[in-house]
Image (tube, helix red, strand yellow):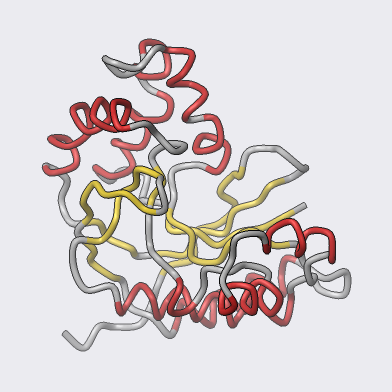
Amino acid sequence: MRYAVYFCPAPASALAALGRDWLSGELAAHGVPGIPLTRWNAMLTEVRRYGWHATLRSPFTLSPDVDLNDLRQVLQVVARSHAPINLPLRCARLAGFPALRPASDCRAVNALAAACVEAVEPLRLPLAETDFQRRASGLDAIETHYLGRYGYPYVFERYRFHMTLSAPASVEEERALQRWLSLRASMLPTARLDALTLCIESSPGAAFEPLERIALQKVSAA
């Protein structure tokens, strides 16, 4: 069993509606013009499993001497210390993946993600050596250090807020994605990151499911 801390859009938001259309609406049956349906569904297999989200703390296993209530408590402390964040998003590419990325200052969301990483760390089961060796391939020295220390290489200054849209796409496939998505994404209101969503993978390979939304509670000084 693994947990993760995500930003998942509020269910009634325009961003959540876009995610439903993208992952499980009409596109699931018909695909995107310019991409065969079988290829389209293959491109979205992992995105559908992990859900419509941006990672704040990547998936982890709890140590045997702690439980879900301990995890809830540390996340509630984080939530009380951070205010909701307004974050305009745009279509972009990150490490070969099409994604929605921030179109403005990321310092507040970066700080929130760092706080989640630090809060969860004392509760996390360390990576097994075999997992470390497998995941370390291709990482630089800083990322390798973070992988060993935090179980994930892309934390702190290496963190990039993003909502993954598909598996890596060819140039032609990405153009097809952009044709369908760009206008819809440009019409989105500014995203509102107002809660931490605690998600659970109940068994290996299962879909990550939202377990609890923990509202960010600090009153903004602005």
Give how far across and how far down residue 87 sits, in percent.
23, 63
Image position of 29 (left or right of 183): right
Image position of 7 (left or right of 74): left
Give how far across and how far down residue 8 sits, in percent.
42, 52
Give how far across and how far down residue 153 sits, in percent.
58, 69
Residue drawn where x is 81% and y is 73% of the image: 66
Q: Is residue 101 above or below residue 174?
A: below
- Residue nearest the viewer, comparing 181 with 115: 181
Snapshot quadrant of residue 59: bottom right
- Residue nearest the viewer, comparing 12 with 35: 35
Residue drawn where x is 74% and y is 45% of the image: 202
Q: Is residue 48 above or below residue 126?
A: above
Furthest residue toward bottom: 221
Give how far across and how far down residue 163 sits, in percent.
38, 50
Q: Number of callouts in the render?
A: 0
Snapshot quadrant of residue 181: top left
Residue drawn where x is 55% and y is 66% of the image: 57
On-image quarter of the C terminus: bottom left
- Residue nearest the viewer, comparing 57 with 84: 57
Q: Is residue 194 above or below residue 199?
A: below
Q: Is residue 164 above or below residue 135?
A: above
Residue drawn where x is 35% and y is 43% of the image: 98
- Residue nearest the viewer, comparing 62 with 77: 62
